[in-house]
Amino acid sequence: MRKISVISVMAAILLCACVKLTTYPIQLHYAPEGAGPEPSSKLGRKTVTVATFKDNREIPDKFVIGREIGIGGKQMPFVSSKGYPSDNVTAAFKSYLEKRGYTVRKESPNWNLDHRIIKPQWGDCVVGGTIDELSVMVSTGYVKTVYDCKLTMKVTVADAQQKKGKFSERIELSSSHTRVGFKLETAEKMINTLLSDAIERTMVELEK
C-alpha cells in the first residue's frame, strides 16, 4: 500500500514538471514602497465610493497586461492572476484610501464620469476613471533582459452630494530596468510600483 502511495506521489510530481506554462500570472495590487500612507483618524469621517475603473485598452483579451519575448521570438503573455485588471485597479485605490483612514464603501458601481448620474448614497466623494495603457514588456536575451512598464490612466474625483467635479487628472508613468535573466517577480514589482505611484499622486488631491 505504501509503495502505491509513493509511486502516485512521484507520478504527480513528474506530471507537474511536464506541464508547461502558457502565461505568466501577475497580481495587480497597491504595493507602496516602505511603510505606505500614514493613517489619519480625521479622514474616517469622509465616506468615499470607488467606482469600477473602465478598461479602455484596445486589446482583444482584457486579462493580458503585456508580454515576455524570449530568445528566438517566443512570446508569453502576462495576465492578471485575480480577475480583470480593471477590478484590480479599483481594489488598489480602495486599499490606499482605507490605509489612509477613509471610510470606503464596499460597492463599486459603474460610473461614466458624468457628474449628473452620481447618487447621494455614494457618500462624500466618488473616485473613478479609465485605464488607457497598462503594460509590462520584457525582452529576454542571452546576456541581458530589458523590462519596460507603462501606465496611462485618467482619474476623476467628484463631490457626491453636490454632484460637482473636484478634479480630473490624466497621468502617464513609465519605468525601465535591465538585469541578467528573467524574473517574474521583477515584472510584477515594477508594474505595481507604477500603479501605486499613480494612486498616491492623484489621491493626495482628495485631501485639498
Image (cartoon, rainbow, N blue to C red):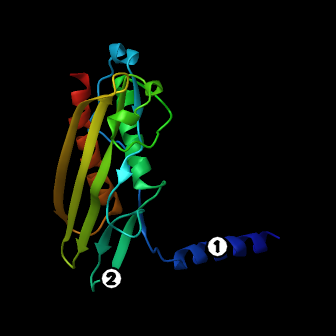
Question: How far apart are labels 1 and 2 at the CA level?
Answer: 28 Å
- SS type, badge 2: loop
| In this view, 37 is above or below 19 | above
Residue type pointed to by label 2: Lys
Q: Quadrant of the C terminus?
A: top left
Q: Callout 1, which amino acid?
A: Ala
Extreme-bottom residue of the structure: 72
Q: Residues within 10 Å of mark 2 (few under 14, many from 20)?
A: few
**Along the horizontal axis of the image, is 175 left or right of 43?**
left
- Tell me if residue 92 can be seen: yes
The answer to the question of whether label 1 and label 2 lie on touching residues, with beta carbons closer than 8 A, is: no
Q: Nearer the viewer, residue 53 or 7?
A: 53
Q: State which quadrant residue 147 falls in.
A: bottom left
Residue toward you, 170 or 98:
170
Picture residue at 47% right of the left edge, 25% below the top:
121
* Quadrant in the rendering for residue 135: bottom left
Q: Give coordinates of residue 66: x percent, y percent.
A: 31, 66
Q: Position of residue 2 (x, y in %)?
A: 78, 69
Residue 9 at x, y percent in the picture: 67, 70
Mark 1 or mark 2: whose residue is earlier in sequence: 1
Label 1 crowding class (10 Å Cα cut-off): few <14, some 14-19, many 20+? few
Left or right: where 105 falls relative to 114 = right
Residue 75 numbered tag: none
- Vertical side of 192 occupied by 57: above or below: below
**Residue placed under numbered mark 2 in the picture:** 74
| Rendered position, 165 above or below 55 | above
Q: Which mark is residue 12?
A: 1
